[in-house]
Image: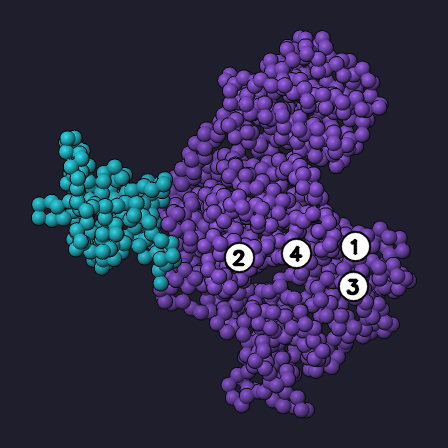
Amino acid sequence: MDDLLCEFLTETNESLDTVDNQLVRFEQDPNNAKILDNIFRLVHTIKGTCGFLGLPRLEALAHAAETLMGKFRDGMAVTGEAVTLILSTIDRIKDILGQLEASGTEPEGADADLIDALHRMAERDPSGPASDIPEATPECEIAGTLTYQILERPLRPGEVSLDDLERAFRETEVESIAPASQSAPAAPAASKLVATAAPKKGEDMPEGDRVANQSIRVNVDTLEHLMTMVSELVLTRNQLLEISRRHEDTEFKVPLQRLSNVTAELQEGVMKTRMQPIGNAWQKLPRIVRDLSSELGKQIELEMHGADTELDRQVLDLVKDPLTHMVRNSADHGLETPAERIRAGKPEQGTIRLSAYHEGGHIIICIADNGRGLDTERIKAKAIQNGLATEAEIEKMTDAQIHKFIFAPGFSTAAAVTSVSGRGVGMDVVRTNIDQIGGTIDIKSVTGEGSSVIIKIPLTLAIVSALIVEAAGDRFAIPQLSVVELVRARANSEHRIERIRDTPVLRLRNKLLPLMHLKRLLKIDDGADSDPENGFIVVTQVGNQTFGIVVDGVFHTEEIVVKPMSTMLRHIGMFSGNTILGDGAVIMIIDPNGIAHALGASVVTQQEIADENAARAGGAEQTSLLVFRAGSDQPKAVPLALVTRLEEIAVAKIEISDGRHMVQYREQLMPLVRMDGVSIGTDGTQPVLVFADDGRAAGLVVDEIIDIVEERLNIEVASSRSGILGSAIIKGRATDVIDIGHFLPMAFSDWFRRKEMRAAATARSVLLVDDSAFFRNMLAPVLKAAGYQVRLATNAQEGLVALRSGQEFDAILTDIEMPDMNGFEFAETVRSDDRLSGTPIIALSSMISPAAIERGRQAGFHDYVAKFDRPGLIAALKEQTAEIGRAA
Amino acid sequence: MTTVNQANESALTEYVTATIGGQLFGLPISRVQDVFKPERLTRVPLASNDIAGVLNLRGRIVTAIDMRARLKLPKGEADRRPMAVGVELRGESYGLLIDSIGEVMKLPDEGREVNPANLDRRTAELSAGVYRLDGQLMVVLDVDRVLEIAPDKLAA
């Protein structure tokens, strides 16, 4: 096959993918002339090129499609039918291209059916000139460029002339014609021949085709080789740096530094050539989903988040097919028909959500749908039938374990397509693909609410920056990406390691961080001088979980070349790979996800929950809870963020004054409140939860502190008992969540009121919008105690109803993460309503980041307060309502 | 074993010999990449006991298999540094730690016998047959089976 043809095939395949995508977009947005122009030009270029290369079938097809699209440009209504027709024309073109690629010649065959249909469709247009359809004449089929030129109809406005076309064609030999798909690997065979070098940012360049895209095509092998050499160079550089570290002042220092910088830049450059946005692998999906939705008679919306997340092209190639497969599965098996959805009380349109992001040195790809979820019973039956497990074994399994069967080899058979209504077709193949690149795959499903598949791909093919630490005499690398900060803990200093039962924790800026000793985790504890209160703590964040890894020493950061673990060692979840250090030693790379997993609250679960939350737009967020025992055997819990300190107070120091228990604490007399049934012993110590606010402290006496857990707090049974908000399942046990608002006034009757009373001389009213029952229950008493009248709304819609009901509110407090309409949207809606725009809105959120605050400001929030920051909340309320008072 | 190959006298296999715990073993030379002194072995926490660690061999990361542990033999003397035979499986490099390396022997295929019934069971598991040499038995190591280390055999 000659080079010209090869180039043509690659480029045309890319262009066609773009056309596919753009058409789907165009169908949804028929008035977007820019998209139409793009499509038109792409098809036009294909047509011209085909004419030039002497490929009559292709040319005729492209021409007919172009004619119809020309009608669109002239104002013909864009119907789904017409788009389908063009899409099937494009499929035919692809088909011919495929054969062309295999045989080198255009296959025999007639396309009269499609061409006729296209023409009929074009003729139906009432506005266009009826004579405008001579294109598919037989001459066309033997047309070279010249004949074509003669037959060309007069140019329409905006259409390119033949000269332009030829110029475009000449340009395409060195430039990419399809901006949006430029770096997308073409059809598999073609991609072996060539691949584009330049990664592409920004998916849709508005009018990109002619804008010079300075790119060349480079053979993948060349890039691979370059990458290998750079890896070697990095290692050699590291060795040199290591040597120079040992010899303090050598004349090599300066040139070495220069070499180091150049190497770093080179490495970055080469890495860039290999990185591609994951959006490239998603490109075909809108088309697939569109086809499926019309085929299956379902309304499907495809959401894509994080399309610009970059990953190594090798990895990208390998995940492409699994992703397509899973989206298909979601559309086919996951989502219900509109009728079923309505019956289930869901919106008619189903959603498939694709998201990708970096996390803890991994790339996480999530495919979620809000369909019916996996059919656990069917999977059970199938698993038993396939002999994967016995009935007895299955009875003991959790749903999540059962769902994992769909990844079992051979689980999906042809029969499964019809008999298993959940997913399962080819999931084992998907898993094999993911396994190949050292990734993991997991599924989470809630019956009736949807399911999500989470793929985690380690950065095995990359160079990452890592912190080198020591534990029990061995060195380990922790990916810098997940390291938040380093803390040196010392006894008697501000940062010291405390213990809650057997769990070491670090109090850092008023937050309790759970700690893990690396050497204990890795079971390499040498028992040597491990000072329980001292150590280096690597504060690590994975997803929304933060924890500390205690190590014996911290060396430096180093750029490491991540090498995958040997297959024999890949099952060890604590490591994501290994690397060779500058001094030639091999060390393990710690997988922060693995550590988080070991911490009990698995990150995967959190991730799943987070996804699930987003997918089903409901539920509650993770809360750190302190679990303790007081009065009865049933565990009790309180949000950790409300607790200021945990103390063991010697019973001997507890005094009784005025019938109340008191203790001298930090040079103040601190009242102690006992929960019902808690008795203060006669000797030893008594655990006390200390709550401090505005310079005063009160202690809640309990029997025993059990644990700190991260859980999604779901108060299932509200309680009528005073002091108990309700019951929740925490770590598998029914746990009473206590109401601090009940106990603290027992210590100081004016606990919540004292200073707020003045501001609240005239009762002001507040609307509190929060989907979480827990927070409503927690905040409402606080607000009431501060003298506000509180009206509660469980979601933004309800909030709007309340606001428009005529009741006047002095301020609105709203949660951010809420289903259907989030706090930002809510605020924007309120702002845009003339009658309501004057009411101050305060955002309550568990996520306080500068970006979120900025986003909040844009949405029109007056203030942004952390959920547990009670004094902050009252202060903000006071300030906002006071301003209103002045203004009024 | 059989006499099929008798006509073809060139059916010889070369073996790299090694001793592990006093027993002579032979590895088909076609499977052996190199022989090296393992240096700077890094232990891998949480790995199976059979895995001695990983090391850097000319820029490649090699997983070292403790053959004594693999054969359930007692640990060697701590002061003697073992040797390693480099082998490959599915593109990954492994180093089999042995006590000492011997000569290369060219042996006729038909001289290979099935495992004698009294061969130690754990040795027999990794054996692809034996040769009776002058005064001693050489066990042919089945490299593939040596590298089949079940991931669930976690160290305690």
Q: Secondary structure at mark 2?
A: helix
Q: Which mark is residue A215?
A: none
Q: Residue at x 68, y 23 (%)?
A: A114
The residue type indicated by label 2 comes to Lys
Q: Cα distance, mark 4 to mark 2? A: 17 Å
> Horizontal and vertical percent for residue A589?
44, 51
The residue at which mark 4 appears reads as A448
Between disc 4 and disc 2, whose residue precedes? 2
Residue A246 showing in the rendered view: no
Subunit under mark 4? A
Foreground mark, 2 or 3, reads 2
The residue at which mark 2 appears reads as A380
Q: Cα distance, mark 4 to mark 3? A: 25 Å
Q: Cα distance, mark 2 to mark 3? A: 41 Å
Q: Secondary structure at mark 1?
A: helix
> Horizontal and vertical percent for residue A103?
51, 20
Q: Cα distance, mark 1 to mark 2? A: 46 Å
The residue at which mark 1 appears reads as A827
Q: Residue at x 56, y 19 (%)?
A: A107
Between disc 4 and disc 1, whose residue precedes? 4
**What's the colour of chain A in the image?**
purple
Between disc 1 and disc 2, whose residue precedes? 2
The residue type indicated by label 1 comes to Ala
Residues marked 4 and 2 touching at CB (< 8 Å): no
Choose between A430 and A229: the one closer to the eye: A430
Give the crowd class for mark 2: few <14, some 14-19, many >=20 residues within 10 Å.
many
The residue type indicated by label 3 comes to Ala
Query: The chain shown in cyan is which?
Result: B
Subunit under mark 3? A
